[in-house]
Amino acid sequence: MNGFMSLVSTSVTRPGAAARALLDLHLSRDVAWTLLALSVIGMVILTFVFSGGQPIPLVPGLDPMTPMIALIFQGSFAVITGYAIYFTGNAMDGKGTLTESILVVAWLQ
């Protein structure tokens, strides 16, 4: 737990060093995708806990956002962000992998 809190602190003060420490763990692709899924699920749960368990109205007059819709929306956004980071990095002659991009997005969630 001490290492986790240290990584959280470093993420705030020196995000580049935190990303390097996270990537130096050399986690597998399966672990990265699992962490992304768990982070999205955690964010949806927190969103609805803070809203009192009620569906969240986005636009007046339309149906409110249910947990399943929020899960699909946030999950899609996280995956698209991971791919965007990966492809943008490659376009700029970066050396990162898709797994590393997904891992960073999962951590940022």
Image: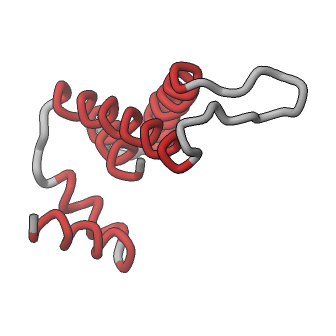
**Is 77 placed left or right of 17 in the picture?**
right
Please give left or right for residue 79 compared with residue 54 in the image. Answer: left
Q: Along the horizontal axis of the image, is 107 left or right of 64?
A: left
The residue shown at (35%, 43%) is: 106
Task: Give the camera-side residue of 101 and 41.
Answer: 41
Numbered disc total: 0
Corner quadrant of residue 66? top right
Q: Position of residue 40 (x, y in %)?
A: 41, 35
Q: Position of residue 75 (x, y in %)?
A: 47, 28
Which residue is pictured at 52% across the width and 20% down the height?
Answer: 68
The residue lying at 38 percent from left, 33 percent from top is: 41
Residue at (58%, 45%) from the top-left corner?
A: 51
Coordinates of residue 76 in the picture (x, y in percent): 52, 25
Q: Nearer the viewer, residue 96 or 3?
A: 3
Q: Quadrant of residue 52?
A: top right
Work out which quarter of the rendered image holds the N terminus and state it. Answer: bottom left
Q: Give the quadrant of residue 98.
A: top left
